Image (cartoon, grey):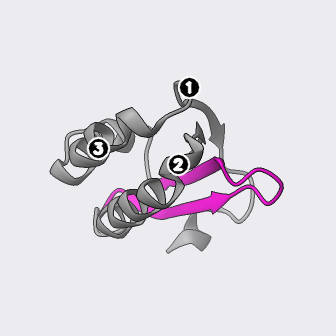
């Protein structure tokens, strides 16, 4: 598994718009065969900050995800909602073992 945490800081007046667009993207992303998990979490003490937790089956699957219409629609629709550019950190899975994600 290949895990990506995407850190997003949203403009305060766009929080609900961002959540709506991102949940739609997450729902569609979960239909992709290369995605095992796609979570959206919101920081408790700063509701303008979010983390997308994306779990891909292979290191090549994020590139495939970025080719989908739902990702491109999300990317374009949330661009103006960002308070700063989003960033990401990539991880290797440790536990549960990869076969535990099925």
On the question of residue 44 being in view, the answer is: yes
Circle 2 sits on which residue? 13
Counting residues from the start of the chain, the first of labels 3 and 1 encountered is 3
Q: Which mark is residue 84?
A: 1
Image coordinates of residue 23 in percent, x first then y, are 42, 66
Q: Main secondary structure of the magenta part?
A: strand
Question: Where 56 falls versus 36 (above or below)?
Answer: above
Report how far apart the C-alphas of labels 3 and 2 lie in the structure.
Answer: 15 Å
Q: Which mark is residue 93?
A: none
Residue visible at 29% across and 44% down in the picture: 77
Residue visible at 49% across and 61% down in the picture: 16
Question: Where 43 falls versus 79 (above or below)?
Answer: below
Is residue 42 highlighted in magenta?
yes
Counting residues from the start of the chain, the first of labels 3 and 2 encountered is 2
> In front: 5, or 36?
5
Q: Is residue 9 left or right of residue 33?
A: right
Q: Label 2: few (<14), some or many (≥20) within 10 Å?
A: few
Residue visible at 28% across and 39% down in the picture: 66
Q: Which mark is residue 77?
A: 3
Stretch in magenta: 33-56
Q: Is residue 75 left or right of residue 14?
A: left
């Amino acid at each position: 598994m290949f895990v990506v945490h995407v850190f997003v800081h949203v403009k305060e007046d766009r929080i609900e718009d961002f959540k709506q667009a991102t949940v739609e993207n997450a729902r569609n992303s979960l239909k992709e065969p290369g995605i095992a998990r796609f979570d959206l979490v919101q920081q408790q003490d700063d509701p303008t900050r979010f983390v997308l937790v994306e779990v891909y089956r292979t290191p090549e699957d994020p590139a495939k995800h970025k080719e989908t219409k739902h990702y491109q629609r999300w990317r374009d629709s949330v661009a103006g909602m960002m308070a700063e550019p989003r960033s990401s950190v990539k991880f290797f899975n440790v536990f549960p073992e990869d076969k535990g994600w099925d």
